[in-house]
Image (cartoon, helix red, strand yellow):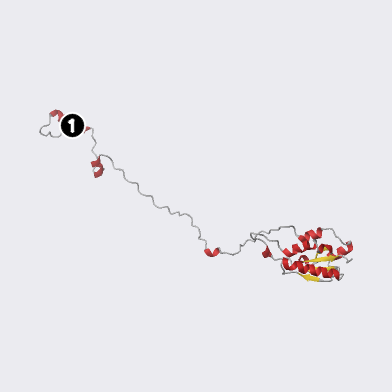
Amino acid sequence: MSRRRHKPGQSPEDIDLWTRATETVTPLARGSLSKGALMGGTTAHQAPHPSPPSTSAAPSREPQSPQSFRIGSRSKTPPPRHDLQPDISAALRAAPPRVDGRTHQRLKAGKLRPEGRIDLHGMTLAQAHPVLVRFLTAAHVDRKRLVLVITGKGKDRDDGGVMPLRRGVLRHQVPHWLHTPPLSQIVLQITPAHYRHGGDGAYYVYLRKPR
């Protein structure tokens, strides 16, 4: 490196010291520092480039249509059945007979012809009970032994709900009436009817002999 010319007022010692100092300095390339870096005395840090937006979007959920949920609409899955008590027909068939064996077998086989019948189907409990009492009392006075009481099997709409109802309320209530006074005093046997006489929707009621 060539020696700089000394300015007026500089001693030879100053010139020699400056020459030694500049011999160890490496000149920077032109344009390597920004103007702000030269003025501030520090190297400027470039801001990081923003990363491109992700192309994989989150899976969108299909919006539920308000028409899919309506008040009063029924679920596709039927509600579970709520059996408050065992089936009354099965309980009556398992009960020991109170008539002689031959009569009981013919009764279950539907070979005995009822001497009278009453249809309670469609009535409420309040309507059916007095009608049944009058019918059986009159049949007993007339010395009839076998009558048919039709209750119906009940409808599927009776099942489910907040307060579950037993399917076929009349079908379950009539045997209870027949086993309690005043009807228990004239009724000897209760048996589910043969299918030709209504099956589980009716009962054979075998009456006692009048005294």
Quarter of the rendering occupied by the C terminus: bottom right
Q: Position of residue 116 (x, y in %)?
A: 82, 71
Any part of residue 151 in sight:
no
Work out whether 59 lies above or below 203: above
Quarter of the rendering occupied by the N terminus: top left
Q: Position of residue 204 (x, y in %)?
A: 81, 66
Would residue 105 be found to the left or right of residue 126 on screen? right
Q: Name the one closer to the observer, 156 or 125.
A: 125
- Splitting the image into 4 quarters, where does residue 131 fall? bottom right
Q: Amino acid at mark 1?
A: Trp
Please, which residue is most extreme toward the left here?
Answer: 8
- Splitting the image into 4 quarters, where does residue 209 fall? bottom right
Q: Position of residue 184 (x, y in %)?
A: 82, 62
Residue drawn at (20%, 30%), measured in percent from left and top?
A: 20
Please, which residue is most extreme toward the top here?
Answer: 13
- Splitting the image into 4 quarters, where does residue 200 fall? bottom right
Q: Name the one closer to the observer, 73 or 33.
A: 73
Any part of residue 128 in sight:
yes
The total number of labels drawn is 1
Q: Position of residue 125 (x, y in %)?
A: 72, 66
Q: Name the one closer to the observer, 143 or 85.
A: 143
Would residue 207 be found to the left or right of residue 74 on screen? right
- Element type where label 1 sits in the image: helix
Residue drawn at (15%, 30%), measured in percent from left and top?
A: 14
**Residue holding disc 1:** 18
Badge 1: how crowded within 10 Å, few (<14), some, or many (20+)?
Answer: few
Residue drawn at (81%, 58%), measured in percent from left and top?
A: 94
